[in-house]
Image (tube, rainbow, N blue to C red):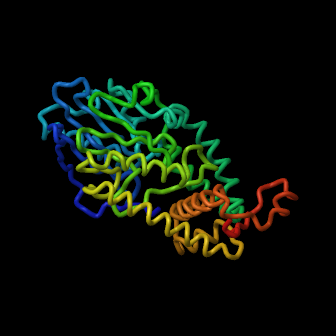
Amino acid sequence: MSVPVHPEPHEVRRFESSAGAQIFQIPLEVFPGFWGYAYAVWLPGTETGRVLIDTGSGFGNSSQHLEEGLAAVSDLTGQDFSPENLTHILITHGHVDHFGGLAAIRPRTPARIGVHELDLRVLTHYEERLVVIARRLDVFLAEAGVSAERRKALIEMYKLTKSLYSSVKVDFTYEAAGMRVGPFELLHVPGHCAGHVVLRLHDVLFSGDHILDRTSPHQSPEHLTLYTGLGHYLQSLEKLRRWAPDVRLVLGGHKEPIHDLAGRIDEIEALHIERLNKVLDFLEQPHTIKEISQILFGEVNGYNVLLALEEAGAHVEYLYQRGRLGIHNLEDIEDSLTPVAIQYYRLPEA
């Protein structure tokens, strides 16, 4: 759930796949103090010759860092990796720190831009999505037990950075392309994001935010967006586990590379089981999602308040959908025409 901060010197790093593809990790300050990565891939002799995976947020210094990184890749490869000469831009998922830079790049590049079908509207009808999700978020926060004043502040925070992006045209979608783009194999892994994909190039996996080192990728309830939610995420981890024997290196959208994919999947699954059990123990007495988030994550500030509420909501939703929780104050909900703070409690096991 926590926001990853890049602690190392911010330099382009080079990796190589088992078949000789050259991979360059470009560090980007996607939000102040919040670092992520885009990846440039050089595949000589193929139609997918100069590929960019993700584009940063387009916020603050992010686009400048991307331009500088692509210039560094050009120097390292002797190939022109400027936006004007990219062949493909592949988006791992529809979160703005991974695709927001498209708004600046799109007018300058002939690259074919791809995204999964379930995140297509995020890129092509972004303004519409912002309105819809903000309304759903207000209802979720009210039911979580957040005051009206606090809800307003959180929703304004949610909208602030996202309002900097404007919709762009996308050239193709991954399922329509057969979940392959040249030598890249794609796997749909919903959960953290509805249309999240990971990309395998030979023995290297580009994991976006689905698998991260030392960070549990953020979860939000499916109540906000279909195909998110903890249930989908855990199922996607098991789908990806089948690829683990053939993956030597995992390059994520944040944090450090991972060299043991199966082991990292085990660690993430164990963390969520621990959180689910903690929620069940706490709900021996009725509580709201706001109170549950405080038990799980303690006192947090800024955008982490919203992240903690969504993460707690995803765990409560998972348990409620599976018959482990009930609603204590059902009459209050039935008698009200507006959203009411919901108090959940643990049901006896069958």
Give the residue furthest to the front: 350
Residue 130: image x %, image y %?
Answer: 59, 42
| Viewer-proximal residue among 106 and 292 | 292
Q: Is residue 256 above or below residue 277?
A: above
Total label count? Answer: 0
Q: Residue at x 28, y 50 (%)?
A: 250
Residue 152 occupies quadrant: bottom right
Q: Residue at x 58, y 63 (%)?
A: 312
Residue 62: image x %, image y %?
Answer: 35, 47
Residue 66 occupies quadrant: top left
| Viewer-proximal residue among 79 and 254 | 254
Residue 181: image x %, image y %?
Answer: 33, 29
Q: Quadrant of the C terminus?
A: bottom right
Looking at the image, can residue 306 be seen? yes
Looking at the image, can residue 100 be seen? no
Q: Is residue 151 left or right of residue 51?
A: right
Residue 336 occupies quadrant: bottom right
Give the residue furthest to the right: 335
Q: Is residue 303 left or right of residue 328?
A: left
Q: Is residue 306 above or below residue 97?
A: below
Residue 318: image x %, image y %?
Answer: 60, 57
Q: Residue at x 28, y 56 (%)?
A: 258
